[in-house]
Image (cartoon, grey):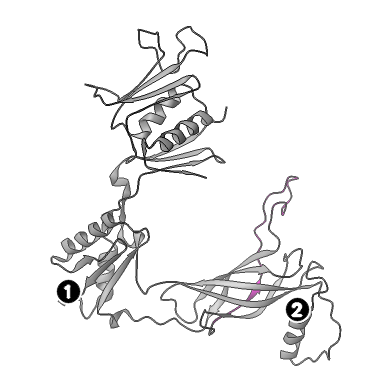
Amino acid sequence: MKSFIFILCLSSIASAARIKDIAMLKGARSNQLFGYGLVIGLPGTGDKSNELTENSMGLVLKGLGIDIKNQKMDTKNAAVVVVSATLPAFQKAGQQLDISIASIGSASSLDNGTLMMTSLKGPDGKIYAIAQGKLVIMKKEGKGGGGGGGANMVSATIPNGATLEKEVGWDVTQEKQLKYVLNIPDFTTAVRISKKINDELGGKYAVANDASTIEVMYPYTFESNPVELIAQIESLDVEADRKAKVIINTRTGTVVLGDQVRIAPIAIAHGNLKLEIKAQNTAQGRNVSSTTPGDSSGAAAGSTGGEGDSAKKLMLINVGTSISEVVSGINETGASAEELIAILQALKASGALLADLEMQ
C-alpha cells in the first residue's frame, strides 16, 4: 500500500515574509540574453554532415584570417549551439554571468567541448555580453556506478561563462515614486503591505492600486536618498495571505495542506470507510472521531470491532474542522493513499472542500 508524506502549513507566523521576498520593485527586473555559437573540441560526437555547422566553422575561421575557399569540412568535432543567460537587475559592466548551452544540430554529446567566443544579445538586438569557455555537464550516477549514465549530454552550462559589456540602465533616483509588484497577486496582501509601509514611515505614503501593485510616494526625508528608503521598505515583515489549496503529488507521495482549508457538511461512503461531517460542536477535545459502527465502547481509529475488514469505519467530523484533521483521521483508519485521493476528489467534486485541489 502506497504511503503519503503530509506537509501542513500550520500557523500564520510561518507565512510572514519580507516585502523583498514577496514583491519586486517595478523596473528592477532581470532580462534574458541569447546568442548563437560554436562548440569545438568534441571527440567525434559533434554534428554529422551539417551544412549549418560547416558554414559556421567557415565564418569563424574567416574571422581569424583563414580562408578555406569553400572546401568541404568535417564537422564531427564541432557543434552549433544556442547560448542563453539571465541578466539580473543592476548588474554592472565587467561582472560575470552564468550561461546555458543547448545543441541545435545532430551532436550526440557536448562533453569535453569548448564554446568559442559568442555574442549575447537582448530582445532589442543589442550585444550585452560576450561568452566563451569550457563546458560543464552535470553527470548523474549510472546504473553501473559509472558517471554519465543519466546525464543530458546535449546541454551544458558554464559558470561565470559570460562577461557583461553593456548595462541595462534604470536610475531609481529619477523616479517620482516607487512601485512594488506582488509575485502572487492578492488584494489582502497588497493592503497589508501598504499599511505596513505607512506604519513604518508614519504617514499616508503607500497605497494599494490593485491586487498586485503598491505605489509608494517619497517622504521628504528620503527624496534625495531613495536607495535608503528601498532598503527600509524591503526588510519589513508582512503576513502574506494565500488562497486555500490542497496539492497532491502522486509521483512523490506528497500532500501539502494549508490550515485555511475548510470543509462543509457532507457524508461520503467509500469502500469500508464512511465520512460524515455534521453541524455540531464538541465540548472538548478533537473535532474528528473515528469508530467502527456497532462498537459502543468507541473503538480506536482503524479497529474492526471483531467484524473483520468488511466492517465499515465511521468518521464523525464537526463543521469548521480543518482538512489537516480530516486527513489525520483518515490515516488513523488505515485508509490507503488511493482511498485518500478518492475522498479528497469527492469532497472537491461535491463542493464540500472549500479550497483548490491540485493534482500533480
Residue displayed at 44% across by 34% down: 344
Q: Position of residue 140 (x, y in %)?
A: 67, 52
Q: Of the residues under marks 2 and 1, which one precedes in the sequence?
A: 2
Residue at far left of view: 203
Q: In this view, does 95 lie to the left or right of 79?
A: left
Q: Which of marks 2 and 1 is in front?
A: 2
The circle on residue 52 is 2
Residue at label 1? 219
Q: Position of residue 68 (x, y in %)?
A: 82, 89
Residue 49: mark in rendering:
none
Type of the residue with mark 1: Pro
Number of callouts: 2
**Which amino acid type corresponds to the residue marked 2 in the rendered image?**
Leu
Q: Is the magenta stretch mostly helix, strand or loop?
A: loop
In magenta segment, residue 132: yes
Task: Give the magenta-colored segment's residue range.
Answer: 128-151
Instruction: Answer with left or right where residue 125 lies relative to residue 15.
Output: right
Using the image, determine if residue 289 lies above or below residue 349: above
Residue extending farthest front: 350
Circle 1 sits in a helix, a strand or a loop, which is it? loop
In the picture, residue 349 is in which quadrant? top left
Q: Position of residue 333 (x, y in %)?
A: 45, 21
Q: Residues within 10 Å of mark 1 (few under 14, many from 20)?
A: some
Q: In this view, does 254 lie above or below 228?
A: above
User: From the viewer's perspective, is residue 274 above or below residue 139?
Assistant: above
Q: Position of residue 115 (x, y in %)?
A: 67, 75
